[in-house]
Image: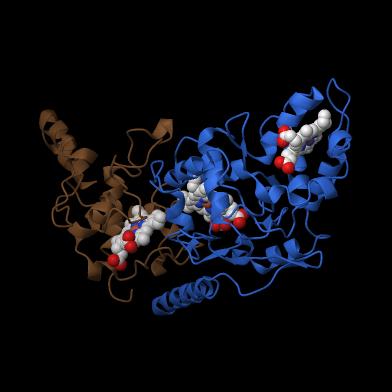
Amino acid sequence: MKRLSVLLLVSVASISGLAVMAYADPVDDTLTIDDREMIIRAKAPKGHPFDEVLSGWLFRESETRATEADSFANPGMLAVERGEELWNTVDGSMGKSCSSCHNDASATMKDVGAHFPKWDAKARKPVNIEMKINDCRTERMGAEPYKFDAEEQVALTTYIKHQSLGTPVQIDLSEGEMQSWWEKGKELYYTRTGQLDFSCASCHEKSMGKFIRADHLSQGQVNGFPTYRFNTAGMVSLHNRFRGCIRDTRAEMPKAFSDELMALEVYVTWRGTGLSVETPAVRQ
Amino acid sequence: MKRFLTCVAVPAFLCSQAAAVEIAPDAVKIDEMKVSQSLTGATGNAEEGAKVLANRGLGNCLACHVVTPLAKEQFHGNVAPALDGVADRWSEAELRAIVVDAKRVFSEETVMPAFYSLDVGINVRKDLAGKTILTAQQVEDVVAYLTTLKGSN
């Protein structure tokens, strides 16, 4: 009897072990959204640790992948709709909406999100879409800036990024001091933090393709952000994700939009050069 | 348990000395990939060790390692080799060194956390500063469990 149960345990383990092995690699599949084929594998830019950059979509389970491929099923599309509503809503002391100046986002914001973060000469640092939205709100609308992760901030960012669906990510490192921010971001990427002593590379480079507990480790690409997560049944912004990954090393988290996280955003965005923008991507 | 009994049987001043035998994280010597002395001066409890291995807030060793005898626990990761039969590959003193600080056994590059070291990453969460992931007792319990992982189990 005892032997039987031991045998049973072993066979359960080897079955689950097998399951792990079978799914340990990114899938070999293509992703088409709204009849447009996404670039989910791209030749890595020069100086990149990998030969090929891979979309996080390739590492997710089949239901998650199918949900992203179908815009009618993708709950993230609700954030896109909400963003469109905000785009056309007047706010602030100057009586303007985004569309008062930018008109139809499908024309004026087309492909814009694929090239952020961008050097901002006035602020003398790189800015992302969230910061750009706040900039227009305070400087050009007389409205309050959105607080980090306000529902409106995430929805508008999702809407703007979605106007680049399918466009390859490509940021300009020749502007201003972008190159030195890239260097700083790279340094941070390889710096171990927290009591658990992990760097981003510990998980997304050295252990890419492996399972850490139940999580299939991807390259940690940013091309799908903001993403919809089943886990929390809501949208997750990029800096929220960065902070979550840092928290999991048992370290203090840098503030959203801090110089540290902006440097990281510049560098990690570069690491995904050539991948299509997939916003809103779907994750578990 | 045994240590506790010893304590009761001897004068109190000796007893407090016995407690002081616990080796502090920065005093652990790793020689030739070995920590020969128990960190607590006593042998750990393998059953407790298995719990520490699985507990996500403690060892969480299963995040990276498959351990077949703990198959009833869900989701074993595969970042690292399975620990099955690990006691055939390493002595008790070597296993203790691996758990204390894998960087000083394998290489600086290893992703395995140091479970009994203060030489960790930057910006450690404030409430954890100066603390090790596992206590000396938990390390001994884990080592006791690892030494049971022999053959094909």
- In x, y percent, where is residue B44? 25, 52
User: In the rendered picture of this protein, how many numbered marks are placed on residues?
Assistant: 0
Q: Position of residue A29 (x, y in %)?
A: 65, 74
Q: Is residue A86 above or below residue A42?
A: above
Q: Residue at x 23, y 69 (%)?
A: B89
Q: Give coordinates of residue A53: x percent, y percent.
A: 55, 63
- Residue for point 70% across, 65% down: A38
Residue furthest to the top? A93
Q: Is residue A154 visible?
A: no
Residue B46 horizontal side relative to residue A29, left or right: left
> Within the image, what quadrant is residue A193 found in?
top left
Q: Is residue B68 left or right of residue A282?
A: left
In screen coordinates, is B12 left or right of A230? left
Camera-side residue of B46 and A3: B46
Of all chains in the rendering, the one displayed in brown is: B
In the image, residue A67 sits, relative to residue A200, either above or below, namely: below
The chain coloured blue carries which letter?
A: A
Q: Position of residue A268 (x, y in %)?
A: 54, 50
Which picture quadrant has residue B107?
Answer: bottom left
Q: Decide if residue A163 is on the left or right side of residue A204.
A: right
Q: Toward the viewer: B125 or A95? A: A95
Residue placed most toward the observer, A198 or B83 = A198
Which quadrant holds the C terminus of chain B?
bottom left
